[in-house]
Amino acid sequence: MSGPPAADTGAVRAGCDRQDVNFKGQPYIEVRDLVFEYRRGSDTDGEPDVVMRAVDGVSLDVPRGSFTAIIGRNGSGKSTLAKNVNALFLPTSGSVTVDGMDTRDDAFVWEIRRRVGMVFQNPDNQLVSAVVEDDVAFGPENLGVAPDEIRERVRAALIAVDMTEQRKMAPHLLSGGQKQRVAIAGVVAMRPDAIIFDEPTAMLDPEGRREVMDVIGRLRADGVTIVLITHFMDETVDADRVVIMDRGRIVLDGTPAEVFRRADEIESLGLRLPFAVELASRLRRRGIDVPAGLLTPEAVAGWLRGSAA
Amino acid sequence: MIRDITLGQYYPEYSIIHKLDPRLKLVVTLLYIASLFLIEDFYGYIIVAASIGGVLAASRVPLRFVVRGLKPIMLIIIFTFALNIFMTRGEVIWEYGWLHVTWEGLRMAFFMALRLILLIIGSSLLTLTTKPMKLTDGIESLLAPAKRLGLPTHELAMMMTIALRFIPTLLEETDKIMKAQQARGADFETGSIFRRAKALVPILIPLFVGAFRIAQDLAMAMEARCYRGGEGRTKLNALRMKRRDLAAAFACAGYLAGIIAERVLV
């Protein structure tokens, strides 16, 4: 399991059978029967007083270059799952491997964190430096990259998130969306294979949300593997795959069209449907026979225009 | 607005003084302060004032910014001035009861005040022309030899960097908490000093809790970006001495030679 990536193709292939048929590629991140418990222990007897099982037996494969969206209510375990992927948390039981490297193996921790970057929810609490440019350089500096190359990476990363003009500014003068784009640039500058976004838009206004989603779209086009954790349904309709979590388990898993067809189940979990899916189902109730699988307002509008003509 | 606060008192400008290596500026400032205690007559002060005036002009920092830096210590200057006038023994020129003013006292008071003013001008020129981040880098680099003695220089520099980054964030947080408390009827402005100090408790507690939460988030974000201490770390803006730094070092040596020569010869 914990062999070097090249020697581990057997395990990687074995996971391949479980992939969605419509997405080709080897799994990059493999989560097997993951259980994670938070412990709030008493120090006297060494036995934890409270054990909270946040992730309860999750298995998930993320193919290289795919876009996976994970949705769930607060406390569904989605963020905890994400933090297990880049070894910020280590499994209570089960395993997580990234490109064949087991997160529990100390030798791989830093390589895993370089390959799987993470963008957090709070735009303020993840920027280290008082200058945008220096903050983007923080990751490459930690990796020991040569100064000239850091400069080049910072330049490219700032272009990728469209923040070149603000490179000399202090983060506290930027908008939430801009700060979050700086955080993304900081991850991009480490040249990761995959980026996990842990509710990156939760604290942003609609404008900032759109900016961040645009950047995510561009990274995906560049071949970066994306795992997006969110509770905004509309951010998931472009994903290759939607995973819905509840109480630490995966309850629905499939392409957006497959998942959102099961409207009743989603609503019974206390989640809302994407706008277009909601719209289509209401139209259906009024006798307009909108086909299933239209996930964006544009698609619904296009169909309506087509059927009216 | 609380967002507009400037950190330290950096004055953005593209002068040669701004561009100098922060390590050099730190060392020169220390030497300059030491030189102030070498001089003891009028000509010495002329050399110092002319030199610092030259640096000030080269830095293109407006004089009023430098003067503003003097305000907080005006009281100390006046106090030392008065103390020196009245407390120095010598040839009495004016007397009233137990108060007496002497020539020596007047001279001493004048020079002491001048010395303090020149000291503040010199050190505020350092902070006016050097970004806090650069200053941090400079201090880290100058303290590097102390690492062998077990001083955690990288960690100290990282702490300063993070402090600089989060001062505005914590100020905003304070602002938010104060407004929230005021909205619920808290009163920070009236009452005795004790009452007002007590009113700060409901601000400080949430602020501390918030600071710990930020620290926890930041620590996780830093680990996710592969931070593992100073070992094996590189720097985007590694400090490098340039020709202009060498020129400045020579100028400083010339200044020191002048001061010493004046002391010995005059």
Image (spheres, coloured by chain):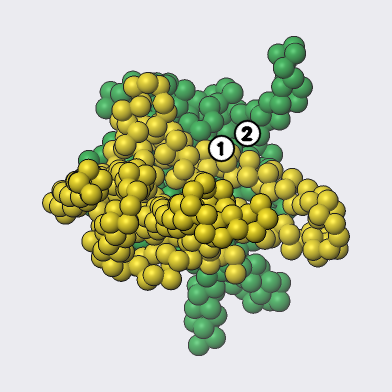
Chain colours: A green, B yellow
Which residue is label 1 attached to? A81
Q: Residue at x 39, y 56 (%)?
A: B118
Q: Earlier in the sequence, mark 1 or mark 2?
A: 2
Label 2 CA crowd tier, 10 Å (few <14, some 14–19, many 20+): many
Label 1 CA crowd tier, 10 Å (few <14, some 14–19, many 20+): many
Callouts 1 and 2 close, C-beta under 8 Å: yes
Q: Is residue A122 at all visible to an observer of this figure?
A: no
Q: Is residue A10 above or below residue B187?
A: above
| Gap in angstroms between the C-alphas marked 1 and 2 | 7 Å
Kind of residue at badge 2: Val
Q: Residue at x 45, y 27 (%)?
A: A103
Element under label 2?
A: strand
Q: Residue at x 32, y 41 (%)?
A: A141
User: On the rendered structure, is A127 left or right of A187?
Assistant: right
Host chain of mark 1:
A
Residue A12 image label: none
User: On the rendered structure, is B208 left or right of B11?
Assistant: right
Which residue is label 2 attached to? A55
Q: Quadrant of the N terminus of chain A?
A: top left
User: On the rendered structure, is B39 left or right of A173?
Assistant: left
Residue B75 spot, x, y in % from top left = 58, 58
Kind of residue at badge 1: Leu
Host chain of mark 2:
A
Residue B161 spot, x, y in % from top left = 44, 45
In the rendered image, residues at marks 1 and 2 fall on the same chain: yes
